[in-house]
Every structure is written in C-alpha cells, then in structure tokens.
Image: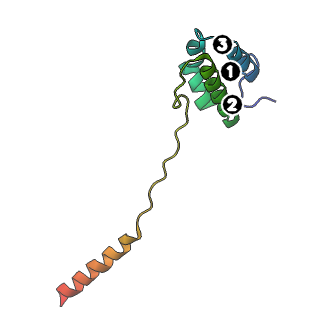
Amino acid sequence: MAYGLAATKNSAFARPVFLKKLSQATKDNFAADFMNSATENYILNEAGSRIYNTYRKQIARKGKELGVSVPSSWARKPFPVKEPEPEEGGEEEPAAEEAAEESAAE
C-alpha cells in the first residue's frame, strides 16, 4: 500500500536511491544535485516529518564532510511565532475611564 506523501521506489527522492546518491556525491556535483530547488521543495512540501529530518541531517553531514557550506536555513520549515498575550493592564484602563466619567458627571 502506497502512501500519498512517500516517494515512489523509482523516484530520485526514494530513501534508498537518495541516500545512495548522496553517499556517492563529490564536491563538484554536491551543490547541483542536492542544493537545488527540486530537493528543497520535496523536503519542505512533500516529504513527511521523518524524511524531512533524515534528509536535512544527511545533506548537512555530507556537505560538511566534502567541505561545502550548507546554510542552516536551507530547507528549513519556518517555526511558528507565538503571539504575545495582552497584558492585564488593559482591564485597569476602563476603570480609570469610568472614574474620569464619574468626576465629570459630578
């Protein structure tokens, strides 16, 4: 049974094919074969979380081994930014406005 997110067995992104190709990479072909938009698109949008981690780590490791710089931001999913919660000081303002209205009414 095939899953929608998994690469087919003959695909360049199938795990055994990809890792074998990565192990045979040289400094000359590393950037062209692995640091391209097709690989980045697959890792970010089509691969599951397990493959995402595996491929990013393996590419970074092989790049370091070959002496090719792999930016840490390459093929990285953006982390969600947590919205700051409103301060409780917002409740005090209406009380101050009410006091001002009461003093104006007197």
The reply, left or right, for residue 94 in relation to residue 19 is left
Residue at image position (58%, 8%) is: 28
Residue at image position (32%, 80%) is: 95
Residue at image position (73%, 23%) is: 15
Secondary structure at numbered mark 1: loop
**Whether residue 47 is visible:** no
Tell which tag, 1 or 2, sits nearer the viewer. 2
Closest to the observer: 23 or 7? 23
Query: Which percent across, then down, holds residue 99?
Result: 26, 83
Query: Which percent across, then down, holds residue 39?
Result: 59, 21
Tag 1 near tag 2, CB within 8 Å: no
Label 1 vs label 3: CA separation? 15 Å
The reply, left or right, for residue 14 in relation to residue 78 is right
Q: Is residue 84 above or below residue 73?
A: below
Tell me which label, 1 or 3, sits earlier in the chain. Answer: 1
Q: Which mark is residue 25?
A: 3
Query: Which percent across, then down, holds residue 57?
Result: 65, 29
| Residue that badge 1 annotates | 13
Dot 1 amino acid type: Phe
Total numbered circles? 3
Label 1 vs label 2: CA separation? 12 Å
Q: Residues within 10 Å of mark 2 (few under 14, many from 20)?
A: few
Q: Which mark is residue 54?
A: 2
- Kindly indicate the quadrant of the structure image that contains residue 51: top right
Residue at image position (28%, 81%) is: 98
Instruction: Work out which quarter of the rendered image holds the N terminus and state it.
Output: top right
Dot 3 amino acid type: Ala
Q: Residues within 10 Å of mark 3 (few under 14, many from 20)?
A: some
Tell which tag, 1 or 3, sits nearer the viewer. 3
Q: Residues within 10 Å of mark 1 (few under 14, many from 20)?
A: many
